[in-house]
Image (tube, coloured by chain):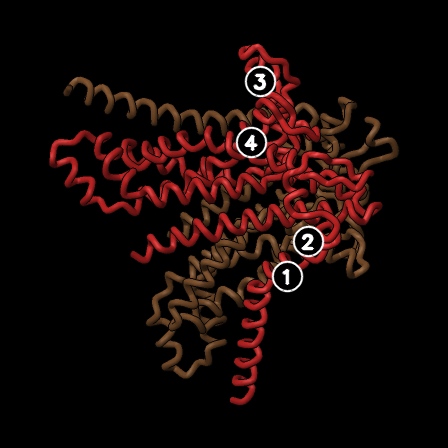
Chain colours: A red, B brown
Amino acid sequence: MTKRKLADSLSSKWMLVCLSFFLLMPLAIGAGLVIKSSGLLSEHTLSSLILSSDWSPSDDQYGFWPFIVSSLWVTIIALIISMPLCLLAAIYLTQFSPSWVLKIMRPVIDILAGIPSVVYGVWGVLIIVPFVGDKVAPFFENESLGYSILAGALVLSVMSVPYILNMLLEVFRQVPVELGEASLSLGATKWETIKHVFIRKGATGILSAYGLGFSKALGETIAVMMVVGNVVQVPESVFDAGYPLPALVANNYGEMMSIPSYESALMFGSLLLFVIILAINIFFRYIIYKSEVI
Amino acid sequence: MTLKRKFEEKFFRVLSALITLVIVYVLANIIWTIIEKGFSSLSWEIISQEPKGGFYMGKGGGILNAIAGSFYLAISATVLAFLVSLPVALFINIYLIKYRRMLVGIRFFLDVLWGIPSIVYGAFAFMLMIALGQKNSLGAGTITVAAMISPIMIRAMDEVLKTIPIGLQEASYALGSTRTETAYKIFFRQALPGFATAVLLAFGRGIGDAASVLFTAGYTDHVPRSFSDPTATLPLAIFFQLGSPIESVQNRAFAAAIVLTIIVLVISISARLLYRGKK
């Protein structure tokens, strides 16, 4: 009997330890990154780090503006492409299509979600980069090698489809059927019902799906890095090469040990990513949570 | 007016169907591209040998180091993640079941944790590794990947455990079981089929991720023999070799890509079959 009680108390404690570990992990990550980047923060002001575009580690100049701008361009363009696609696909799958189509699409979405980032990168190098370089750029009378913001955004838009689409499907599933039926019985067409009832009713859910998609896309590293060109500059058009934040961190890990302030700078880059993504996640998850409670 | 409304209806019906088709087409295009490129470079030599001298100049050898390394890494990370995720998932659903607010808070928190990109895990783990005086190794990579996939695993297990009726728990207590016995003997067994899906999901995520192992697992031409050896992984093998200007080295990247894609496809299809089998 006492043996059972002992086992119970030991195992309870172990469970608590495991849980506390996960609760403390983000705090530890945040604290560690802050400590590591404090060296950089003590020498430069936060605003000069973020707003300066002078990046020359050998002269101790660390301006993150080119990387921030590149990250934002790539992510925002990717979202602009995938937002309407996901919304219409979700509408089709939940409202218009016969149910077997959704049954086929579920594994398709699963597989898209499961394909590793680096494989998207390979696909991007083989298909998207030549497409941008040979077709899109000349069409807009631009010259581009193909390794560009636009290529990164296109790859990223495909990668974000399964993530956003899954959430949108859930949003539309949760809209009460009666609401739609009421609208239909008043003589609205199916599309009008979707437009005025479903989208309005699901607005917060849709917005949150986009927000979370944005944060997911912002942190995407390898695939984007393989197609975006990685040139330190503030991109002036979508056909220019860019250098997003995650790519900066991933590309330089080898050299970063040689110069301490460089290492500090890369950790500051990670910290920026971490804080932005955490904030977006908390904000939109909270909105979802609120809308589920009500 | 009616004509316009009818037209609008038709237009969006067709448009949304087309877009769904486009998504299917893109997936087909990705898989076809990888298969077409990879298949011609794939050979028994490539998947059964370690790199030989001059490998990265286009000479002989294969990517066995990366294939084995990836499996070692993903399997040990999944096992480790399982060992810490299972207690958490059980704890949430058995001990905290009465505390609704806390439960919601923890689920919320785990979802947020899921959103942290793998590059941040990688950078943090690298920093920790340096601070502790460790080198790139299979062990370090395993811990990093395990930390990254655990939130996914916990939430997936949690979704399964959530569906177990509270009556089962009460019945177990009524018969005199402790909470631990209820957790591991009743709940665990009940949720086992669903757990398999959770584990596969996490495994798939672990084997495909590059950003978290880039800093931590290192890279080597040999199959690792212990946790303190560095290890090659498939995603990094693809990434590094694709960057080479030599065509035959690039082709090996494509061969590695097809291997990785097949592994991930098999995992994601079997996860789905298991999930359906459960229903």
Q: Nearer the viewer, mark 3 or mark 2?
A: 2
Task: State the CA–CA distance, disc 3 to disc 1.
Answer: 43 Å
Residue A123 found in image quarter? top right
Mark 2, residue position: B124
x and y, in percent, of residue B25 in the image: 46, 25
Assess disc 1: are there few (<14), some (14-19) or many (≥20) residues with their C-alpha within 10 Å of its C-alpha: some
CA gap, disc 1 to disc 2? 9 Å
Q: Distance between the residues labelled 2 and 4?
A: 26 Å
Q: Is mark 2 on a helix, strand or loop?
A: helix
Q: Which mark is residue A131?
A: 3
Q: What residue type is labelled 3?
A: Phe
Residue A41 showing in the rendered view: yes
Q: In this view, does A152 lie above or below A178?
A: above
Disc 1 to disc 2: CB gap under 8 Å: yes
Total labels drawn: 4
Q: Residue sitting at 58 percent across and 42 percent down?
A: A219
